[in-house]
């Protein structure tokens, strides 16, 4: 799947991923009202609203982007109907040729980790048959329980030729409380990065590993160090736009081949119509605002990479 991600990035010339993280507050009133008219102000109504919201944004942007990243918590909050909307979103994006990164941030051990890996990336055995549950192409994984939590995902990645992105240095302000702590004079995130490179060497695509890393755009200097620590790992870079990251901050996340990183923007794209910059589109044309936000993001990152 890493090969397909790279192929999509080359085809679109857009090393970006759209975070499909819908809050109901992002969904325009006309979309909500239509869903509520059919299902009532229920969990089913909310799930229908976010599904229709996602679908319109994907329809407006799929030709411009290589991948999407739905954050599972935004769907889980609506219970079982929300998870149905999640699966519908994953399937629809894959029908459109997009790579889907399931932002699930799972991290456990033993049979529990194996079940997470099977449920999201693999196939579960039911009698004489096998079924793919949520069938994302990649998943995000929390490594802080150690190799026991990661190896079941590596096993499924080998079997299914899918991938994972391991949390290394996250974009949130308090990430340093643990991730920056020094161990024998070196920050913990750097040691995790070395493990990512080690795990990744076991599951290689043509030029990059199935095992990538999550490194926040809000920490560009750390990104520069980690790029050298993990030369064969793709870096998923959250924190662009709404969290303050800009194209000029990101050039060191990329390798000299122009690959090696994919930059995420979530509400900066899906809720673009709420920004003053895109206000002229209005809520009725929210998907067109998202398309323009994608074009602007691609131009920003492309300009920064050309200027480095």
Image (cartoon, rainbow, N blue to C red):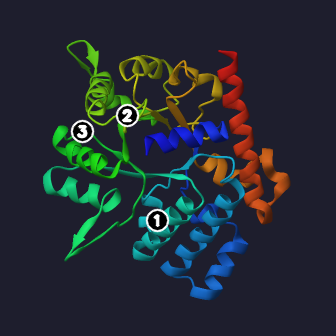
Residue 32 location, x and y as percent? 65, 74
Label 2 Cα neighbours within 10 Å, binned few <14 / some 14-19 / many ≥20: many
What x and y, as percent, mark residue 176? Answer: 36, 28
Q: Residue pushed farthest right?
A: 280
Residue shown at the point (41%, 66%) measured from the top left: 76
Provide the residue designation for mark 1: 75
Q: Does the residue at mark 1 contact the one at mark 3 (Cβ under 8 Å)?
A: no
Tell me which corner region of the image, top left, top right, bottom left or bottom right, holds residue 36.
Answer: bottom right
Q: Earlier in the sequence, mark 2 or mark 1?
A: 1
- Name which of mark 2 and mark 3 comes first in the sequence: 3
Q: Secondary structure at mark 2?
A: loop
Task: Using the rendered view, name the quadrant where residue 231 is placed.
Answer: top left
Q: Which residue is mark 3?
A: 144
Judged from this view, the residue extending furthest toward the left is 110
Query: How far apart are the alpha carbons under marks 1 and 3?
Result: 24 Å
The mark nearer the N terminus, 1 or 3, is: 1
Q: Is residue 68 above or below residue 40?
A: above
Mark 1 and mark 2 in contact (Cβ < 8 Å)? no
Mark 2 sits on what residue? Answer: 209
């Amino acid at each position: 799947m890493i090969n397909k991600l790279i192929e999509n990035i080359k085809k679109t010339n857009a090393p970006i991923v759209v975070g499909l993280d819908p809050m109901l507050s992002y969904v325009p009133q006309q979309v909500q009202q239509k869903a509520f008219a059919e299902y009532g102000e229920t969990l089913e109504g909310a799930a229908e609203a976010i599904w229709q919201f996602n679908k319109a944004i994907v329809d407006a942007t799929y030709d411009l982007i290589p991948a999407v990243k739905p954050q599972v918590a935004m769907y889980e909050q609506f219970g079982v109907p929300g998870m149905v909307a999640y699966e519908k979103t994953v399937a629809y994006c894959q029908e459109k040729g997009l790579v889907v990164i399931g932002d699930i941030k799972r991290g456990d051990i033993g049979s529990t980790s194996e079940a997470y890996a099977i449920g999201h990336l693999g196939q579960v055995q039911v009698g004489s048959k096998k079924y793919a549950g949520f069938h994302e192409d990649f998943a995000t994984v929390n490594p802080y329980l150690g190799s026991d939590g990661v190896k079941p995902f590596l096993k499924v990645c080998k079997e299914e030729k899918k991938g994972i992105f391991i949390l290394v240095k996250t974009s949130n302000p308090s990430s340093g409380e643990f991730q920056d702590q020094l161990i024998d004079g070196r920050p913990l995130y750097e040691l995790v990065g070395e493990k990512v490179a080690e795990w990744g060497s076991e599951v290689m695509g043509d030029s990059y590993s199935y095992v990538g890393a999550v490194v926040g755009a809000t920490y560009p200097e750390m990104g520069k160090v980690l790029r050298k620590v993990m030369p064969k790992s793709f870096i998923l870079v959250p924190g662009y736009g709404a969290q303050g990251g800009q194209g000029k901050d990101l050039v060191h996340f990329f390798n000299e081949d122009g690959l090696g990183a994919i930059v995420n923007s979530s509400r900066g794209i899906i809720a673009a119509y709420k920004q003053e910059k895109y206000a002229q589109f209005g809520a009725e044309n929210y998907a067109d605002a998202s398309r323009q936000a994608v074009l602007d993001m691609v131009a920003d990152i492309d300009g920064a990479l050309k200027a480095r």
